[in-house]
């Protein structure tokens, strides 16, 4: 079967697309990769938390999918909105990489070792708010661009440290500047971080059957729980919400965080259960009831007031 994969053009996105392509070729399929540029790739001078972020890295790819120009899309799952448009479905979530964040620095091996006013780079409001809670004395600045660009800015001395997902660094073989992989208790990851999503047109039985072998039950269960919580809280991929689910036997444990952007308030809740959606609902309700609703109302208001995307 001939399959056309749609992907963003970054080094990491192309690694992900090629990884899926090789798995599909191993099943006897003929595979082509088509690079598509998304809104998020075009806005490089503004922190993602300051623009409307839902679908920023998927919208144009979905348009090509709906138009029949590609047969499937490979995304980072954390970039995929929790509510898909009707024409699409996530047909497979492959085995997940490590979902944790990593502190990268040539000189410092832990967050608490950073000197006062150390310049730390991240454009993730989730990371920024949790870092500010841990170290309010840090000088946190926006950091956009692909992985190579971010690491180059770190190596040049523009930043004392940066925070990136360890999954992307491992996939690209660029772990040389990783000082420490941060536990979810220290920095709660984004919902779906470390996982890929294979998106297809809803009801496309042939493509669904072709990619079904890629679906990993553990990854789908854990990320499904995390994304259910994110959806219940109304979140996109750039909000101060962290979610980390782990499956042991049939039991899921979900730990989640909602933080104010300045780090002055960090709400944490966790629970275990055997129903992903009931578990997500329970944890979300507790976060909302203890102050999360007010935090998110202020954050979403700020995003809504941002300039329109170009």
Image (cartoon, rainbow, N blue to C red):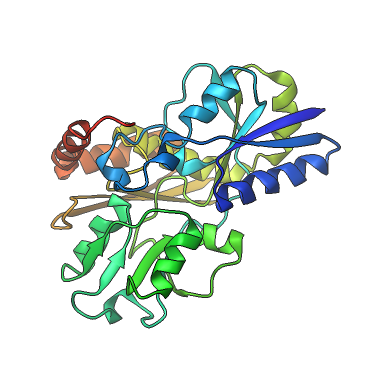
Whether residue 247 is visible to the viewer of this picture, yes or no, is yes
Q: Position of residue 93 (x, y in %)?
A: 60, 40
| Vertical side of 117 occupied by 132: above or below | above
- The residue that appears at 16% across and 34% down in the rendered structure is 301
- Decide if residue 232 is on the left or right side of residue 250: left
**Residue nearest the viewer, comparing 249 with 141:** 141
| Vertical side of 22 occupied by 3: above or below | above
Q: Position of residue 238 (x, y in %)?
A: 33, 44
| Vertical side of 143 occupied by 233: above or below | above
Q: For residue 6, what is the image quadrant?
A: top right
Whether residue 249 is visible to the viewer of this picture, yes or no, is no
- Decide if residue 119 is on the left or right side of residue 289: right
- Decide if residue 40 is on the left or right side of residue 208: left
Q: Which quadrant: the C terminus? A: top left
Q: Which quadrant: the N terminus? A: top right
- The residue that appears at 46% across and 25% down in the rendered structure is 84
Q: For residue 54, what is the image quadrant?
A: top left
């Amino acid at each position: 079967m001939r399959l056309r994969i749609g992907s963003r053009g970054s080094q990491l996105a192309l690694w992900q697309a090629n990884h899926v392509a090789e798995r599909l070729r191993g099943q006897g399929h003929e595979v082509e990769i088509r690079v598509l540029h998304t809104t998020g790739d075009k806005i490089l001078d503004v922190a993602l938390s300051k623009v409307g972020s839902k679908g920023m890295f998927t919208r144009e790819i979905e348009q090509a999918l709906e138009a029949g120009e590609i047969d499937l899309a490979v995304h980072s799952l954390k970039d995929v909105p929790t509510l898909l448009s009707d024409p699409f479905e996530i047909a497979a979530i492959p085995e997940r990489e490590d979902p944790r964040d990593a502190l990268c620095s040539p000189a410092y091996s832990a967050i608490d070792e950073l000197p006062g006013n150390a310049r730390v780079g991240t454009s993730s409001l989730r990371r920024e708010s949790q870092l500010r809670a841990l170290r309010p004395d840090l000088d946190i600045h926006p950091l956009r661009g692909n992985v190579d660009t971010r690491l180059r800015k770190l190596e040049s001395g523009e930043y004392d440290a940066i925070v990136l997902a360890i999954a992307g660094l491992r996939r690209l073989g660029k772990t040389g500047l990783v000082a420490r992989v941060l536990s979810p208790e220290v920095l709660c990851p984004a919902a779906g971080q470390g996982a890929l999503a294979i998106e297809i047109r809803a009801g496309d039985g042939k493509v669904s059957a072709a990619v079904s072998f890629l679906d990993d039950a553990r990854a789908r269960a854990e990320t499904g729980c995390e994304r259910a919580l994110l959806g219940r809280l109304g979140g996109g991929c750039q909000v101060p919400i962290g979610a980390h689910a782990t499956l042991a036997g049939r039991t899921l444990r979900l730990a989640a965080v909602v933080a104010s952007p300045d780090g002055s308030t960090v709400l944490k809740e966790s629970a275990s259960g055997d129903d992903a959606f009931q578990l997500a609902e329970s944890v979300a309700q507790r976060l909302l009831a203890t102050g999360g609703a007010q935090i998110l109302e202020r954050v979403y208001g700020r995003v809504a007031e941002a300039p329109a995307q170009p």
